[in-house]
Image (cartoon, rainbow, N blue to C red):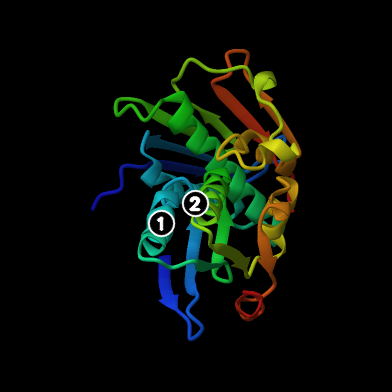
Amino acid sequence: MGFSQARDASGVTVVKVDGQLIVGNRQELKDLVFAALDKGERRILIDFSQTGYIDSSGLGALVSISKRVREAGGELRLSGLNEDLRSLFELTKLDTLFAIAETPQQALSSF
Amino acid sequence: MTSPLRLCVRRSPAPDAEGAATLVTLRLPSDIACVEEAVELVVRHCLAGHETTRKTRFRLQVCLSEALSNAILRGNREEQDKWVDVRAELVTDEGTGFDPASVPEPIRPEQLDELGGRGLFLIRKLVDAVHFNSQGNSICMMLRRP
């Protein structure tokens, strides 16, 4: 459970969310992505293929990350949302705010 | 490390008039680090022995997480001497309460960039019925199986 970070061959920072993204760990994800931005990374992919559920705090953290990436002139993609997770984005209309790909591979090729 | 959560599960041999055969009570401290474990415990014991769908489990997880984080952050303001009590689908905090009708829906285009304000909205969308007590410090969420 937690977050893992890697840099793919094309230089995209890939963060995988393993388990939940909720009130108890949202800050950890923000810190991780903000640290990557501070190091100069500008293309970020957050993958949810191994994610159980997300609460509104987790969604808020993603909005916060989105803002920071935008301010830094970077690009953010999300991927791997199953039907349940995607429904949260649709209910909150956040599917209109984020660039969401079906798979991490599709997201990587869209940068 | 000993968990600070206090769980009690009572199973009766026959369902009551409401169809409930399991009563789950849980007391947790006002610490957001406890939310994930609390959700896992309540969901596991509420659904044990019941046929359910992945969607129902998911909705229960999300709504419990919302209710608990609201109780801890907004109700109890993370004060160490305050607790949150869960009784199956009933979550009560020790805060002063709030007016649920005053919470706006966060889906207008100009609001999408807001970091917060989606918790109650998600609960209302994901459960079959939601009620607050008059003080606004207790929420009852109804989620029908499966």
Name which residue type carries label 2.
Arg
SS for dot 2: helix
Say which residue appears at 67% left-offset and 62% top-offset: A99
Residue placed under numbered mark 1 in the picture: A34
Query: Can residue B70 be seen at all in this image of the molecule?
Result: yes
* Residue density around tag 1, few if under 14, some if 14–19, many if 20 or more, within 10 Å: some
Circle 2 packing at 10 Å, graded few (<14), some (14-19), many (20+), is some
Does A24 appear above or below B100?
Answer: below
Q: Name the residue under label 2.
A: A68
Label 1 and label 2: CA atoms lie apart by 8 Å
Q: Where is residue A80 in the image (x, y as percent from the top left)?
A: 63, 70
Question: In the rendered image of this protein, does residue B111 appear above or below residue A11?
Answer: above
Quadrant in the picture for the C terminus of chain B: bottom right
Residue A6 at x, y = what percent? 42, 76
Marking on residue A82 = none
Q: Does residue A16 sit above or below B20 in this rendering?
A: below
Residue placed most toward the observer, B31 or B60: B31
Residue B105 is situated, as x and y percent measured from the top left of the image, at: 71, 32
Tag 1 near tag 2, CB within 8 Å: yes
| First reached walking from the N terminus: tag 1 or tag 2 | 1
Element under label 1?
helix
